[in-house]
Image (cartoon, rainbow, N blue to C red):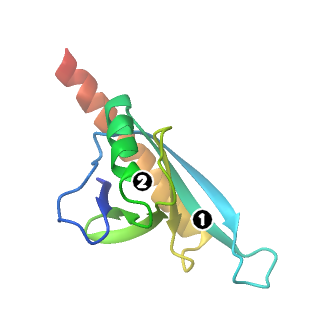
Amino acid sequence: MRPKIFLEGASPIPLFDEYDIRTAQIGTVENIFSKDENDRVYTIWLTLDRRSSFYLQKETATRPGGRLQLVSNGQVLGIHPIEATISNGVLPFILSTRMTEQGARILYDQMGQSLIHIQAELANERK
């Protein structure tokens, strides 16, 4: 899995790719559209490296109201609405409301494994 982050409606060139992402975490939020108390929407929280964090701050400062898309293998996996400038380098992406807990965990595991391999690849190149 090679995740990429695009600005919705912009050029087909990603703002960030798998080499800019340092960590991934999984989380949940209550699905406010459901009356089921156990209904959850899953999120993937990505932390970017320092250089990419500065670029994220610059891009989000000028694009309130826009949306970032988390894409892998040509499929949009999640979105992040830009409400304000993001200055901490952390991007929570809301996954589809149709994604089950099992699907979210599989996505998280695949992304985590991919990031480990990418970090090892980068470490080898620096030697």
Q: Amino acid at mark 2?
A: Gln
Mark 1 lies on a secondary structure that is strand
98 in relation to 17, above or below: below
123 in relation to 64, above or below: above
- Dividing the picture into quadrants, the one containing residue 120 is top left
Mark earlier in primary sequence (2, 1): 1
- Dividing the picture into quadrants, the one containing residue 54 is top left
Cβ atoms at labels 2 and 1 below 8 Å apart:
no
9 in relation to 82, above or below: below
83 in relation to 48, above or below: below
Q: Residue at x 39, y 37 (%)?
A: 53
Q: Residue at x 22, y 22 (%)?
A: 124
Disc 2 marks which residue? 110
Q: Which label was assigned to residue 55?
A: none
- Is 87 situated left or right of 3 in this image? right
Q: Position of residue 35 (x, y in %)?
A: 79, 85
Q: Position of residue 20 (x, y in %)?
A: 31, 40
Q: Position of residue 117 (x, y in %)?
A: 32, 37
Mark 2 lies on a secondary structure that is helix
